[in-house]
Image: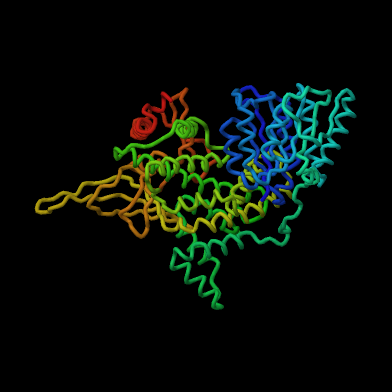
């Protein structure tokens, strides 16, 4: 699917209002057609060198339009206060074989045109002098509105030029059909459209307008999702395989049996959020919240499932890193990769794009590969390759990221919410097509451990109080298990079902608050969100109710082990505690 990248070099702490306005205007103009899956919109409101280069690399083969808006010059783009070398950005954009347009909506960017054209980019929009922020916003908004209305690049430029001149008669804008030589004297025209002569046909290029959509009235919630999950999980789960085979042979299987089988197969806590989506409202169940109707509430629950799934996978690979470090093995971490890890720990994950977790997974995988190690969830290596190939999985993730932004809007129209909800459910189903392997794993919470040592017994054994996190429509199993080897106390484990002796400790990234309470029995899971250096607080979000107030861990005695674990991890990876990062 085509990709449009919008990079706005705004400042998080002191944002420019006109740049925010342009950002919001373009998103408002373009998002309805992303809703219809005409293209993928990659919006970067606080562009940095890292985010811009990552976006170009991720979308390399699908990138069609790249917009930069912010401070610039004839040989630089200013990203988060740093000057990015224009030649380097041009080189990266030159690696994008389907790129049609680069729009540099900053001051005096004409000096970058020659280099971009030399890299084979067909069409460039750039400026020959300093521009006022308000005029830059007006010009780009009109240009993209015209593109959205199925105008060609050339037609959209002419319409934006006409409106700008109408509002500001002193402004000039022209089309240039020649390859400008570097050092050409600046002319009076402020905006210019530059094109490679041999690629002049690109001036007629238009945004894709063809995509299938499902009418709201014809969509049955959960139908596609359940069918996809049954097929995706069947190769890994004999119970589900038999159901699918029986139905293929003409038998009818109960929807309740299918739901139960799916929930048992998928690791908790993803299954707990999925359960909420699959439950139908029944008479007499007043006061409860149900998500079986297409709309904003269901959309928000779909996004929670997506976030929980991606974050769980992200934490497993982060735990992999620690296992290597704890075992005394040297981690090979480049400074740039280490910087990404630091950003994860010190910036909020909750309430922001899950793309950060995908970036975290990619970063951690780079470290694993450099160290010659495999992930505990070995299937993640192939999943990463599939995602990087920019196929249906990449499209599904990109759309769900878009849906997450839309769901956060304060006044999302009801009909638009319904359409996004339907598309998001289809994309969630696509995501699960690639994640059937998750049923190979089960999670457990280790509450406490008793030592069993008696005379005449040759080996010491350990009695574990274990909460098996296997989902049902109601409740979780609490068991006592006898093992010859002690597992980690107060920990959340992910275990390979076919090799139950193989487990990975996910704490302190995922914790069970009730494992620290002798009187509590039911699991209460939290995901790590961030570390606040100013207050020395470890912030966790409730897995089952992610919108609830977070769990704040500071100096509580019962959570001291978590603070110690984080310092041990930080010392292993960064050679200093988190407080000093």
Q: Residue furthest bottom?
A: 250
Q: Tell me where residue 393 appears, x and y as whole percent.
A: 57, 53
Q: Tell me where residue 556 appears, x and y as whole percent.
A: 37, 30
Q: Nearer the viewer, residue 82 or 253?
A: 82
Q: How is the image coloured?
A: rainbow
Q: Nearer the viewer, residue 159 or 95?
A: 95
Does residue 546 appear left or right of residue 56 in this picture? left
Q: Residue at x 54, y 74 (%)?
A: 247
Q: Nearer the viewer, residue 90 or 182?
A: 182
Q: Looking at the image, how many numbered discs can be counted on the residues?
A: 0
Q: Residue at x 46, y 36 (%)?
A: 540
Q: Judge whether residue 523 can be spotted in this image.
A: yes
Q: Tell me where residue 275 appears, x and y as whole percent.
A: 52, 55
Query: In which quadrant of the rendered view does residue 49 lie?
Result: top right
Q: Residue at x 53, y 65 (%)?
A: 231
Q: Is the C terminus in the top left, top right, bottom left or bottom right quadrant? A: top left
Does residue 156 appear left or right of residue 557 in this picture? right
Q: Residue furthest left?
A: 456
Q: Nearer the viewer, residue 347 or 53?
A: 53
Q: Tell me where residue 492 appears, x and y as whole percent.
A: 38, 45
Q: Judge whether residue 287 can be spotted in this image.
A: no
Q: Residue at x 73, y 24 (%)?
A: 183
């Amino acid at each position: 699917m085509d990709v449009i990248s919008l990079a706005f070099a705004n400042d998080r702490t002191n944002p420019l209002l006109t740049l925010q306005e342009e950002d919001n205007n373009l998103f408002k103009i373009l998002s309805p057609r992303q809703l219809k899956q005409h293209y993928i919109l990659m919006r970067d409101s606080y562009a940095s060198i890292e985010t811009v280069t990552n976006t170009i690399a991720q979308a390399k083969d699908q990138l069609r339009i790249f917009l930069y808006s912010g401070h610039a010059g004839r040989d630089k783009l200013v990203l988060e206060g740093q000057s990015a070398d224009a030649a380097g950005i041009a080189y990266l954009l030159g690696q994008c074989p389907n790129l049609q347009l680069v729009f540099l909506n900053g001051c005096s960017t004409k000096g970058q045109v020659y280099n971009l054209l030399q890299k084979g980019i067909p069409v460039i929009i750039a400026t020959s002098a300093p521009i006022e922020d308000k005029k830059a916003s007006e010009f780009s908004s009109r240009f993209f509105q015209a593109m959205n209305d199925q105008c060609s690049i050339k037609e959209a430029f002419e319409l934006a030029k006409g409106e700008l001149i109408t509002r500001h008669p002193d402004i000039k804008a022209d089309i240039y059909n020649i390859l400008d030589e570097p050092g050409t004297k600046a002319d009076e025209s402020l905006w210019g459209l530059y094109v490679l002569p041999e690629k002049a046909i690109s001036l007629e290029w238009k945004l894709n307008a063809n995509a299938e959509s499902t009418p709201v009235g014809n969509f049955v919630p959960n139908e596609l999702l359940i069918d996809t999950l049954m097929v995706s999980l069947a190769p890994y789960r004999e119970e589900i395989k038999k159901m699918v085979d029986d139905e293929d042979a003409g038998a009818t299987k109960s929807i309740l049996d299918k739901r139960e089988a799916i929930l048992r197969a998928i690791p908790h806590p993803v299954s707990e959020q999925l359960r909420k989506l699959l439950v139908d409202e029944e008479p007499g169940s007043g006061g409860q919240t149900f998500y079986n109707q297409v709309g904003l509430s269901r959309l928000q629950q779909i996004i929670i499932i997506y976030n929980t799934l991606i974050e769980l996978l992200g934490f497993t690979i982060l735990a992999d890193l620690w296992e290597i470090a704890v075992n005394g093995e040297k981690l090979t971490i480049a400074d740039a990769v280490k910087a990404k890890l630091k950003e994860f720990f010190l910036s909020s994950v909750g309430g922001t794009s899950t793309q950060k977790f995908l970036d975290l997974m990619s970063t951690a995988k780079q470290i694993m590969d450099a160290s010659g190690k495999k992930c505990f969830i070995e299937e993640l290596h192939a999943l990463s390759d599939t995602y990087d190939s920019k196929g249906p999985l990449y499209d599904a993730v990109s759309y769900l990221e878009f849906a997450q932004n839309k769901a956060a809007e304060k006044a999302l129209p009801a009909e638009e919410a319904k359409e996004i909800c339907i598309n998001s459910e289809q994309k969630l189903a696509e995501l699960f097509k690639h994640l059937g392997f998750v049923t190979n794993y089960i999670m457990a919470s280790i509450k406490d451990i008793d030592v069993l040592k008696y005379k005449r017994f040759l080996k010491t054994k350990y009695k574990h109080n274990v909460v098996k996190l296997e989902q049902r429509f109601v409740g979780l199993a609490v068991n006592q298990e006898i093992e010859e080897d002690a597992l980690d106390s107060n920990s959340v484990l992910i275990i390979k079902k076919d090799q139950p002796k193989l487990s990975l400790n996910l704490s302190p990234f995922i914790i069970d608050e009730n494992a620290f309470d002798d009187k509590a029995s039911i699991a209460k899971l939290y995901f790590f969100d961030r570390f606040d250096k100013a207050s020395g607080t470890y912030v966790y979000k409730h897995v089952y109710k992610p919108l609830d107030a977070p769990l704040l861990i500071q100096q509580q005695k019962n959570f001291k082990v978590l603070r110690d674990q984080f310092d041990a991890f930080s010392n292993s990876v960064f050679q200093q505690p988190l407080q000093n990062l």
